[in-house]
């Protein structure tokens, strides 16, 4: 697979992750030093230009994902994955909390053979360390076309912190990240 992870002109890399609702992941990765941008969107399905409404039906095959542009001189891909596995449940198939369906699956969409190898290595390490009570079911699959989600999904938590979903589900996830990964925070 060609290396699509690095832009030769900027030295920045891409990471694409699915771990339930993209609002939750975006809220965390927006706070990670070395992360230049986070966009919510859809990947892994067969229908071009899916809408949120279509993806929510579970019939398009897409997962809700975030696409991260990061500086590997500040944070490594492995570190991004360590955060990923620390903030969602990679042992539940097609579910995160009350969000159920294939669109909420746990997935690493790799952009290079190096990213693929790193993802498998991190999963193997976590499995050997027995950090989870159940097997990790996270898919490790090649990146496919990324479709950016509608504007109202971008920076959702930052714009709607007191909305009930944000207050009761996203805020604790962000708090868990901030407590566990203090050395990775842009603004401690």
Image (tube, grey):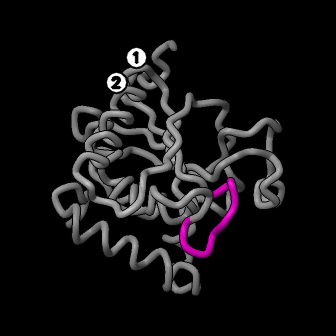
* Count of picture labels: 2
Quadrant of the image occupied by residue 121: top left
User: Image point 75% across, 45% down: which residue?
Assistant: 61
Where does the image place residue 175, in percent across and percent down from the top left? 32, 75
Q: Residues within 10 Å of mark 1 (few under 14, many from 20)?
A: few
Using the image, determine if residue 144 lies above or below residue 138.
Answer: above
Using the image as rendered, state which of residue 119 and residue 143 is in the foreground.
Answer: 119
**Local secondary structure at mark 2:** loop
* Image: magenta residue range: 96-104
User: Image point 71% across, 55% down: which residue?
Assistant: 150
Pick out the residue farthest to the left.
Answer: 183
Using the image as rendered, state which of residue 36 and residue 115 is in the foreground.
Answer: 115
User: Image point 55% across, 32% down: which residue?
Assistant: 141
Where does the image place residue 79, in percent across and percent down from the top left? 27, 44
Using the image, determine if residue 102 lies above or below residue 164.
Answer: above
Give the alpha-carbon distance from disc 2 to disc 1, as whole Å: 5 Å
The residue that mark 2 highlights is 11
Circles 2 and 1 in contact, beta carbons < 8 Å: yes
The residue that mark 1 highlights is 8
Where does the image place residue 137, in percent across and percent down from the top left? 50, 49
User: Image point 37% across, 71% down: which residue?
Assistant: 174
Asked if residue 100 lies in the magenta stretch, the reply is yes
Asked if residue 92 lies in the magenta stretch, the reply is no
Q: Is residue 46 left or right of residue 42?
A: right
Using the image as rendered, state which of residue 81 and residue 14 is in the foreground.
Answer: 81
**Local secondary structure at mark 1:** loop
């Amino acid at each position: 697979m060609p290396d699509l992870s690095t832009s030769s002109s900027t030295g920045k890399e891409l990471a694409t992750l699915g771990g339930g609702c993209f609002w939750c992941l975006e809220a965390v990765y927006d706070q990670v030093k070395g992360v230049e941008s986070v966009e919510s969107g859809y990947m892994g399905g067969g229908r071009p230009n899916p809408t949120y409404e279509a993806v929510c039906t579970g019939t398009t095959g897409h997962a809700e994902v975030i696409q991260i542009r990061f500086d590997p001189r500040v944070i490594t891909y492995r570190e991004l994955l360590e955060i990923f596995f620390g903030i969602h449940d990679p042992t539940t198939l097609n579910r995160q909390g009350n969000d159920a369906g294939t669109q909420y699956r746990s997935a690493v969409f790799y952009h290079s053979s190096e990213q693929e190898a790193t993802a498998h290595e991190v999963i193997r390490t976590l499995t050997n360390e027995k950090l989870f009570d159940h097997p990790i079911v996270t898919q490790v699959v090649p990146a496919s076309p990324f479709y950016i989600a509608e504007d109202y999904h971008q920076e959702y938590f930052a714009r709607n912190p007191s909305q009930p979903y944000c207050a009761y589900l996203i805020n604790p996830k962000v708090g868990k990240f901030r407590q566990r990964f203090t050395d990775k925070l842009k603004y401690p």
